[in-house]
Image: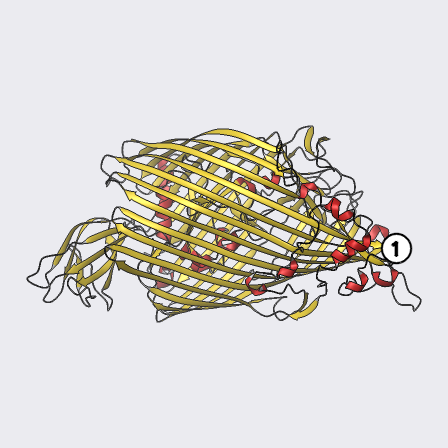
């Protein structure tokens, strides 16, 4: 399609006019008393735009034409002040702090600050348009409309983005390991022990300023990605003083007001903390060999030090509660403008899920080996604090201190009922798990304008991530199917106590992770020529240094039987492990330590990067940005049992990463972009560590592979974008990615086990198309249409991964072995959906204060677990999710919001491709050779929230 055809096609999609306007706002005070002046007239010379100051001396002038303007301020008995050369930029805010002097006194200095508003839809569209790499984003304004509770729910509205487990982000169908996440321009730590992932649900939406997803590389971005780089920006500083309080009450179908089974963790459980009694007593021997060498009686003595809190209690689930407190303050300390923004969030939520799980023999389709129903109840808490300080010493120097802290806790209880079908055994199992996570990021940053042409900024950051699983208790009871006792009643369930401890039967698991990250970042930018030009030439350079230290330790204790235990094995889970039954004598229980050396490790990474990039303009329409980034990465991993000597992993890699971004302006409203970048994908410490993690819910184990290599990716992008108006957008993007040594999951062919690891495939490729549109009707004659906005995006993605005849992976002992390849050698990449669709319909009536929106989201079927000949590949099937939100503003101080999420209660369904045709057919029940089979099914229930927000004073937050 030629250029003229494109112009005609997209012109038909919008009749709105292109208008570039900004906002001027500020404060006027008395030059002598410093008191606010009420009723001053403020106008833009040469226009009809004008306003008056309010009781706090504040004024706002909206829709000011972009360019250089003269602001005139007048007041009775005061000298009129004219402020020339006030630069107004499209979509941005210019702030003026000035004072008026009484007649007969000298005029005071005027401070003019250009504040770039970043949290509005127009601002995000403008930012994306001006960026050199290809990017998409979402603003705080759009997040507020959709009433998304956290960053995970919000980011799924972005083109090419989907979620796994409602918290992990996939971009362009690539798994979480292929993304990089930055919080306020600092690389965020992984929040998970068993994978390289960032849990987006830990970031509450009300502290977000915007999220930008970079889909093509540039020298300024970290080079470790293939899907995208996600930059999360929290709110920085308020423009005016404000305080608001919000309270949300949530009702979830099938959970709220239902009776469920749970367990008690004591302590400050409502704050995500646990009782100190949940930890292993310090008197326990540190080594498994030392513990197991003791007599059964002595080991039982230690076992009795562990609390007997196995018993479950019935609870009636109360509604979910969320509370948010936000405040912003601005004041002066001499000549320094100081501002503070503080946000405190607390959430207590509940989720009951009725899960159906089936495991198969896989000799014929739907030949069930094991079948279970899991009654799963999870109570989660989150306490979050955002605390930011800004010190503006002068128009050329600003210092900031930003701190983000999250404390999270989850108490999960699973009661499993089912059967081991082929052996004719009924099964009843219990899992009582508590997880605590603490995440802290604190950074000090400075912005310096060395001149009108040269800018420097720097960041010094400290990050901490902690995760604890204290005393995860698991127990399994069994009985023969149909067996009756002497009284004619079914035989009681009896504890299944193995000879050697294992994570499936009866035991207690403990783990802790501590990760600390120190980062130093510096960036330099110099503009050539006139800095007021719309597209000046710039050169950028910078450095990024990071030191990361991770300590992980796990302990597992399993109960053993001493002699015949028929008298106590039939006791309920709350009585079986009472002190009188754990003596180590005949007919009782003792304890064994099942910990192995691989269960604890220490990992260190050192990351040093430098970059340089520059713009080359070919006339007023074409811009070429060339960049080069060099990254040195050192990674070591040692077992905690062998802190000296040769490490298990010692990788030293230098990666040269060139990038090219080209933009051609077809018109002032249309751009054509081309991008190329070379990136890498490094194995995470957890993926290298030989530790084996047991997933009770899915009945699988995950083990690391010390032999993983760094993957390299070549990325190509082509994008056409059209901006009919400042808040409208239409874009089409095509992309292609070629992988060498991509890191994929692999099901280890161990008889009777379901153990996954990570391995390098030979190669892979990924290509697709993305469409995004944002359409308003501001010029319509209909008032209803003027208040309506339609937002949508869709993605089509195709991928293939090629594996070799032989795969190197850890065997049962953890030592790297060579396995014959029994997997599909030309399948899709794991977690890659072939299509993604997001649609949103927004209506806002500024006169009445009513807002309505309806949102739709679906992701196509994607590989959830990579299988082999023995165990088919498992797919996560599509869910059609519809959300509806309504809000009403009253007197600009109170807002009431009603939200209904997942209104149709779409099921979660995971199915196995038994017939090997790389798709899931309609037949998932028969034993036909062409049938497939369901592995996991459940529903979460519709979720209804009612929120009230009361604002004390004005709340206008800009950076």
User: Residue 170 occupies which quadrant of the picture?
Assistant: top right
Count the marks: 1
The front one of 216 and 489 is: 489
User: Residue 52 occupies which quadrant of the picture?
Assistant: bottom left
Q: Return the x and y of residue 64 as percentages of the image width and height.
A: 24, 54
- Is residue 12 visible in the rendered image? The answer is no
Extreme left residue here?
Answer: 104
The front one of 742 and 870 is: 742
Residue for point 71% across, 66% down? 312
Q: Which residue is mark 1?
A: 563
- Is residue 84 visible in the rendered image? The answer is yes
User: Residue 256 occupies which quadrant of the picture?
Assistant: bottom right
Residue for point 58% across, 33% down? 742
Say if 697 sits above or below 455 in the image: below
Left or right of 318, for residue 293:
right
Q: Judge the density around disc 1: few (<14), some (14-19), many (≥20) Cα neighbours within 10 Å.
A: few
């Amino acid at each position: 399609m030629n250029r003229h055809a494109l112009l005609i096609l997209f012109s038909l999609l919008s009749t709105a006019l292109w208008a570039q306007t900004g906002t001027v706002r500020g404060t006027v005070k008395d030059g002598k008393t410093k008191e606010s002046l009420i009723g001053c007239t403020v106008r833009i010379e040469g226009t009809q735009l004008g306003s008056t100051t309010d009781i706090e001396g504040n004024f706002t002038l909206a829709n000011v034409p972009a360019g250089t303007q003269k602001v005139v301020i007048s007041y009775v008995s005061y000298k009129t002040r004219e402020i020339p050369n006030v630069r107004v930029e499209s979509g941005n805010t210019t702030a003026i702090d000035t004072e008026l002097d009484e007649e007969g006194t000298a005029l005071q200095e005027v401070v003019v600050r250009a504040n770039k508003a970043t949290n509005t839809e127009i601002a995000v569209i403008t930012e994306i348009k001006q960026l050199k790499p290809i990017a998409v984003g979402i603003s705080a304004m759009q997040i507020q409309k959709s009433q998304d509770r956290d960053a995970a729910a919000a980011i799924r509205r972005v083109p090419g983005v989907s979620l796994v487990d409602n918290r992990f982000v996939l971009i362009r169908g690539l798994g979480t390991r292929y993304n990089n996440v930055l919080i306020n321009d600092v690389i965020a730590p992984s929040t998970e022990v068993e994978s390289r992932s960032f849990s987006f649900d830990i970031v509450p939406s009300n502290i977000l300023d915007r999220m930008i997803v970079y889909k093509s590389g540039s020298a300024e971005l970290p080079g470790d990605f293939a899907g995208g780089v996600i930059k999360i920006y929290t709110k920085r500083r308020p423009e005016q003083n404000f305080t608001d309080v919000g309270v949300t009450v949530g009702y979830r179908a099938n959970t709220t007001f239902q009776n469920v089974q749970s367990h008690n963790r004591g302590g400050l459980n409502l704050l995500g903390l646990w009782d100190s009694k949940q930890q292993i007593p310090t008197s326990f021997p540190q080594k498994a060999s030392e513990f197991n060498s003791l007599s059964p009686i002595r080991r039982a003595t230690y076992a009795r030090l562990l609390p007997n809190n196995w018993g479950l209690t019935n609870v009636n689930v109360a509604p979910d509660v969320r509370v948010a407190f936000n405040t912003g303050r601005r004041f002066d300390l001499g000549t320094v403008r100081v501002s503070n923004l503080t946000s405190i969030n607390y959430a207590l939520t509940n989720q009951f899920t009725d899960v159906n799980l089936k495991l198969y023999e896989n000799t014929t389709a739907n030949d069930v080996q094991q079948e279970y129903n899991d009654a799963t109840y999870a109570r989660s808490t989150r306490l979050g604090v955002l605390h930011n300080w800004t010190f503006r010493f002068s128009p050329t120097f600003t210092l900031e201190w930003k701190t983000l802290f999250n404390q999270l806790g989850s108490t999960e209880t699973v009661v499993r009922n089912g059967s081991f079908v082929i052996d004719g055994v009924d099964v009843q199992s219990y899992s009582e798990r508590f997880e605590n996570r603490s995440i802290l990021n604190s950074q000090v940053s400075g912005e310096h304008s060395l001149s009108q042409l040269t800018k420097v900024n720097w960041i010094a950051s400290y990050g901490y991530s902690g995760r604890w699983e204290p005393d995860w208790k698991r127990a399994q009871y069994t009985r023969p199917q149909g067996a009756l006792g002497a009284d004619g009643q079914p035989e009681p369930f009896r504890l299944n106590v193995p000879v050697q401890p294992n994570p499936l039967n009866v035991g207690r698991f403990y783990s802790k992770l501590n990760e600390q990250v120190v980062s130093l970042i510096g960036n330099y930018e110099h503009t050539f020529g006139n800095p007021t030009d719309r597209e000046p030439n710039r050169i950028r350079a910078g450095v990024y240094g990071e030191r990361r230290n991770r300590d992980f330790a796990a302990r597992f204790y399993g109960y053993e039987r001493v002699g015949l235990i028929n008298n106590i094995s039939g006791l309920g889970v709350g009585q079986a492990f009472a002190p009188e039954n754990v003596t180590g004598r005949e007919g009782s229980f003792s304890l064994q330590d099942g910990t192995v050396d691989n269960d604890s490790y220490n990992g260190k990474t050192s990351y040093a990067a430098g970059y340089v990039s520059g713009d080359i303009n070919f006339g007023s329409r074409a811009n070429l940005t060339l960049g080069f980034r060099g990254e040195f990465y050192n990674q070591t991993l040692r077992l905690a049992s062998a802190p000296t000597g040769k490490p298990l992993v010692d990788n030293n890699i230098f990666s040269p990463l060139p990038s090219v971004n080209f933009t051609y302006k077809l018109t002032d409203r249309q751009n054509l972009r081309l991008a190329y970048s070379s990136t890498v994908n490094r194995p995470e410490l957890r993926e290298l560590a030989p530790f084996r993690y047991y997933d009770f819910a899915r009945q699988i184990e995950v083990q690391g592979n010390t032999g993983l290599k760094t993957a390299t990716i070549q990325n190509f992008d082509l994008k056409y974008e059209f901006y009919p108006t400042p808040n409208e957008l239409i874009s089409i993007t095509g992309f292609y990615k070629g992988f060498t040594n991509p890191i994929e999951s692999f099901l280890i062919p161990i008889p009777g086990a379901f153990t996954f690891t990570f391995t390098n495939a030979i190669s892979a490729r990924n290509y697709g198309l993305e469409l995004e549109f944002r359409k308003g009707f501001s010029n319509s004659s209909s008032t209803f249409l003027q208040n309506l906005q339609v937002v949508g995006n869709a993605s089509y993605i195709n991928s293939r991964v090629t594996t070799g005849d032989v795969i190197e992976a850890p065997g049962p002992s953890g030592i790297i072995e060579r396995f014959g390849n029994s997997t599909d050698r030309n399948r899709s990449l794991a977690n890659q959906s072939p299509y993604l669709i997001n649609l949103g319909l927004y209506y806002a009536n500024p006169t009445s204060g009513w807002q309505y929106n309806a949102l739709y989201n679906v992701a196509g079927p994607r590989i959830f677990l990579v299988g082999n000949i023995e165990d088919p590949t498992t797919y996560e099937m599509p869910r059609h999710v519809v959300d509806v939100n309504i809000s009403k503003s009253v007197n600009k101080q109170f807002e009431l919001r009603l939200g209904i999420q997942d209104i149709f209660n779409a099921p979660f369904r995971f199915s196995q491709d038994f017939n090997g045709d790389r798709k899931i057919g309609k037949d998932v029940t028969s034993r036909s050779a062409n049938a497939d089979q369901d592995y996991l099914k459940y529903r979460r229930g519709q979720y209804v929230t009612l929120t009230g927000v009361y604002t004390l004073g004005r709340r206008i937050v800009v950076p």
